[in-house]
Image: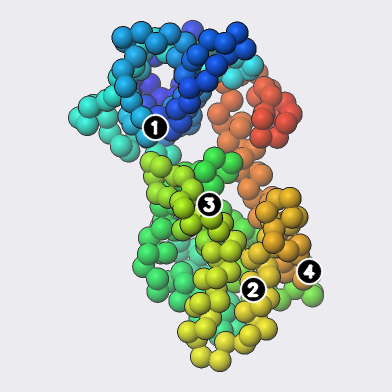
């Protein structure tokens, strides 16, 4: 199998890929064509079918397909021009080739998260974390397999866990530098800030928004989960529950980015900054890793709306 990350301009490609998106569109000249997003564990590539010949057979989104085509360069990005396509048979592909996995060991990431939980001194917050992260088997398993986003950042198996631990580490560092920060509150909400994503996003290979994810979003789901689990714990302070929920529903920072409230306590603001930084750095790293250019420059990035350069010293 030739992985997407290894494709180069001019390559002829005959192989099996997962079709994540399928759209029938019209060009500026009125010609009908099909636009696809094909994936494997190394990345994704746009593909186009310009001629609907008998060699293009019926298929649907999330089918594995065998394609025959050529790699072209369009607006500084690789693209496949497909001439032949059919659905793959079950014995022609290995599912493990089509789901990207975190480069870090997932069990080690989870152990790191557990150590942070044990470091929380407040018994109410530590009890809440244990109830959600350790005792809920569905959430525990989902953390091992879910991504942190559909495509923007940490969009691979274990990505949600990797992002959660990284945000907790950043928050831990910041709590030691500022005297007015309640570390227990900050670490607790760092671990829980994206917990709603275990219900917002489906498992691989789909990695798409669920109905509840589309209708409610992970911030609302997470705040609701905190309230439900806190209510089960004896004498959980109402004010503490309110502060945790505020941090969660404000962690996107601004209304235009999906925040229900803007951060109004220091811990909420630090959480927002840590979450935003980790997500954007991971997205930047993915842009550098997936660049098809041989020079230091990646070409125009739609995510960052600029041309990015690799550091080469």
Q: Nearer the viewer, residue 258 or 193?
A: 258
Q: In the rendered image, which residue does mark 4 sit on?
A: 264
| Residue 141 % position (x, y) | 38, 60
The residue shown at (56%, 56%) is: 217
- Residue furthest to the front in view is 30
Distance from label 1 to label 2 (Cα)?
Answer: 39 Å
Residue 194 in the figure: left or right of residue 107: right
Residue 151 vertical placement versus 241 (above, below) = above
Chain-order first, disc 2 or disc 4: 2
Q: Can you say whether 193 is above or below 75 in the image?
A: below
What residue does disc 1 label? Answer: 61
Looking at the rendering, which quadrant does residue 307 occupy?
top right
Q: Which residue is mark 2?
A: 244
Which of the 4 image quarters holds residue 101?
top left
**Mark 1 or mark 4: whose residue is earlier in sequence:** 1
Residue 269 position, x and y percent, is 75, 63
Tag 1 and tag 4, C-beta contact below 8 Å: no
Residues at discs 2 and 4 in contact (Cβ within 8 Å): no
Question: Foreground mark, 3 or 2?
Answer: 3
- Mark 1: which secondary structure? loop
Q: CA distance from mark 2 to mark 4?
A: 12 Å
**Residue under numbered circle 3:** 214
Q: Earlier in the sequence, mark 1 or mark 2?
A: 1
Local crowd size for mark 4, using a 10 Å CA cut-off: few (<14), some (14–19), many (≥20): few
Q: What quarter of the picture does the N terminus occupy?
A: top left
- Work out whether mark 3 precedes mark 1 in sequence or the reverse, and give the earlier one: 1
* Image location (x, y in percent) of residue 198: 46, 58
Q: From the viewer's perspective, is the residue at label 4 or at label 3 nearer?
A: 3
């Amino acid at each position: 199998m030739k992985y997407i990350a290894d494709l180069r301009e001019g390559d002829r490609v005959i192989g099996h890929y997962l079709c994540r998106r399928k759209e029938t569109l019209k060009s500026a000249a009125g010609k009908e064509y099909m636009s696809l997003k094909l994936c494997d564990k190394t990345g994704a590539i746009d593909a186009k079918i310009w001629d609907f010949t008998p060699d293009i057979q019926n298929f649907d989104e999330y089918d594995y397909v065998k394609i025959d085509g050529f790699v072209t360069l369009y607006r500084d990005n690789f693209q496949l021009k497909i001439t032949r396509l059919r659905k793959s048979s079950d014995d022609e592909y290995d599912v493990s080739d089509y789901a990207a996995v975190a480069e870090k060991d997932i069990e080690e990431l989870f152990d790191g998260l557990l150590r942070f939980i044990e470091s929380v001194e407040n018994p109410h917050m530590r009890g809440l974390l244990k109830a959600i992260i350790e005792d809920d088997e569905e959430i525990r398993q989902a953390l091992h397999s879910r991504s942190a986003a559909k495509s923007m950042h940490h969009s691979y198996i274990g990505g949600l866990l990797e992002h959660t631990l990284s945000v907790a580490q950043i928050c831990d560092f910041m709590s030691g530098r500022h005297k007015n920060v309640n570390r227990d509150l900050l670490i607790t909400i760092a671990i829980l800030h994206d917990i709603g994503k275990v219900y917002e996003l489906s498992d691989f290979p789909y990695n798409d928004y669920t109905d509840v994810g589309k209708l409610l979003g992970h911030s609302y789901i997470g705040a609701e989960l905190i309230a439900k689990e806190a209510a089960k714990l004896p004498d959980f302070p109402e004010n503490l529950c309110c502060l945790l929920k505020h941090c969660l529903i404000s962690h996107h920072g601004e209304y235009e980015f999906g925040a229900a409230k803007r951060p109004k306590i220091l811990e909420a603001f630090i959480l927002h900054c840590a979450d935003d930084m980790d997500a954007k750095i991971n997205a930047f790293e993915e842009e550098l890793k997936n660049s098809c250019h041989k020079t230091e420059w990646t070409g125009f990035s739609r995510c960052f709306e600029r041309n990015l350069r690799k550091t080469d010293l």
